[in-house]
Structures are given as C-alpha cells and as structure tokens.
Image: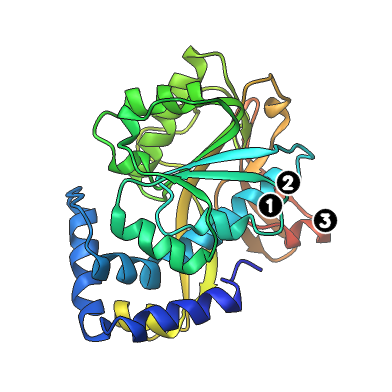
Amino acid sequence: MFDLPKDILFRLDELSETYGVNRNEVRAYSELSKNYRNQNFKEMNFSHAIAYALGRMPATYGVIKYVLERFKNTGKNFSNILDIGAGVGALKIALRDYEISYKALEKSEAMRKVFRKLSGDDSKIYSEDFLKFQIETRYQAVFASYFINEIKNKKSALKKIFDLSEKYVFILEPGTPNGFKNILEAKKIAMELNWYPLLPCATRGCQLSDEDWCHFSIRLPRTKHHAKLKNAALPYEDEKFCYVIFSKKETSFFKNNTIIKRPMKKSGHTIFDVCTGNGIRRIVRTDKSSRKLQWGDQL
C-alpha cells in the first residue's frame, strides 16, 4: 500500500548505475547515518544525495503516504501545498494522484538535482535557507517532514511554518524521543498561535509521562539497495515515526481515540492503549472486529 511506485524504483536504479556511485553508496550512507545520529547536518554532495534516496526514500515515502491517507479519511482537503525541506521529492511523488498545486523548498543543491531526476517535472523548488525565505504568499497546507530535527532554531522555524499556512500544517519526525520532543514543541507553539490538532491527538497538550513518547510504525519491504546499504538480512523494515496534523479552524480532535501502542491480542480479548479526550486510557475489547484494529487506528 505504501510501496514506492515502480517507475520511481526504476529511476533509482538508473541513478545508481548511470552516475557510477555504486561502490561509494555504502560509505556515503554510513556517513549520512553517523552525521544524523550526531545531529551533524553537513552539506550533502551528489553521492550522499543518491545514497539518501536509495536508503531513506522508501521509508519517508511510506510514512508520508500513511499520514496523507489519515488526513484524507477526515474528509478535509487543500488545493495547494508548500513542501519545506523537500529532500528528494517523496511528498511530490506521494501527491501524484492528487490535483494539488505543489511548490517546494530545499536548500541542498545535490538533493534538488536528485529530486528533478526522480520526479521528471519542473515543479517550483525554492533554494533559500528556510529562516531567510521571503514569504511570497500563504499556502492552504504546509508540510515539514523530517525537517525540524535538522533545524537549530526550532521555535523560529515552527512559528514561520504556521505563518506560511492558511489551513493545515503537517509535521513528521523520526519515531524517537527527540523526534517526539519536536512534536511537543510544535503543539506548544500551535496553542500559542491558536491552532488545533487534527490528528492523531485528542488533547491540545500531552498526557504521556516524561519517560514515554507517542510514535507509530509501518512495515515496508526492503529494496535491494536498501538491504545493501544497511547490510540487512530481513526482507522488510519497520519504520518508526511521529506526526501531528494541525488545523487553523477548531476541530473535533477531542473525539479522537487513537491507538498509540501495538495492540495486545489475548485469548478472547484485545488490550488497547488509547489517547482520548480524557487522557491516556487502557481499554479492553472482546468483540471480534477489534482484533482487526492496528497501532495508529481510531478505536
């Protein structure tokens, strides 16, 4: 359901073969991973950008598709979007079946080059540093995936993201404690600016203890490149992520009952940890239909 389209997989193969970086990809991806863990976000060269596309694009695309599907299920929509920190264009590809005006902002020249080769179109891509980006207009939706984690001045960046949008803001982050801290910071600023959570939250604040964090997971098949870059034996990967969608108009977010942990299926019943308008609740259900519910679904 969330697999990269076949034509994009083919173009990734072409990138790897045409530019002769195959023997350097493992080293380049290792450098990227190390720098990311150490919060050392250096300028990428072309080999790094290709390695990033091969190693990370299947997961980022899958997460973006998951979040867009959740948004679509609310019955809401938007007609134009700004993709901040667009990378190699995962959101652009995820939106190919939507009739939406798309613009992007990506500072890295190498990432923009890979973006063009994968998307094959002439979408508008701004190249400015985000905090220096001059606002030409406001957008119905603004999307920032795996972006806040790489910004030093997170509060200023988040405030500018909200200022750019008229209706919706999408924030996606790694499914780690640090990624969730960025989500909490976004929620704090959203409250200050009078925005409301749409999904997955049921409260404007957060009821989780300091030792816990809210994240979700999707299982994706590994491509041959991904398996090679990670020296992985399993044919799949579980990608953990955090996300929140905000709405400028007040929503019925308090009616959300999002399953925030993997359901515990027992004999004759299922146990769910659920984010509700009354805080985090553990709910036991015995009906058969509940056994089909998954982590991230609404109970």
Q: Nearer the viewer, mark 3 or mark 1?
A: 1
Q: Which mark is residue 288?
A: none
Is 17 situated left or right of 137 in this image? left
**Label 2, on which residue?**
72
174 relative to 52, above or below: above
Q: Secondary structure at mark 1?
A: helix
Q: Label 3 amino acid?
A: Asp
Could you tell me which residue is drawn at 36 percent across and 38 percent down? 148
For the residues labelled 1 and 2, the Cα–Cα distance comes to: 5 Å
Mark 3 surroundings: few (<14), some (14-19) or many (≥20) residues within 10 A: few
Q: Quadrant of residue 64?
A: bottom right
265 relative to 133, above or below: below
Q: Label 2 amino acid?
A: Lys
Position in image of residue 127 (x %, y %): 35, 43
Q: Label 1 amino acid?
A: Glu
**Label 1, on which residue?**
69
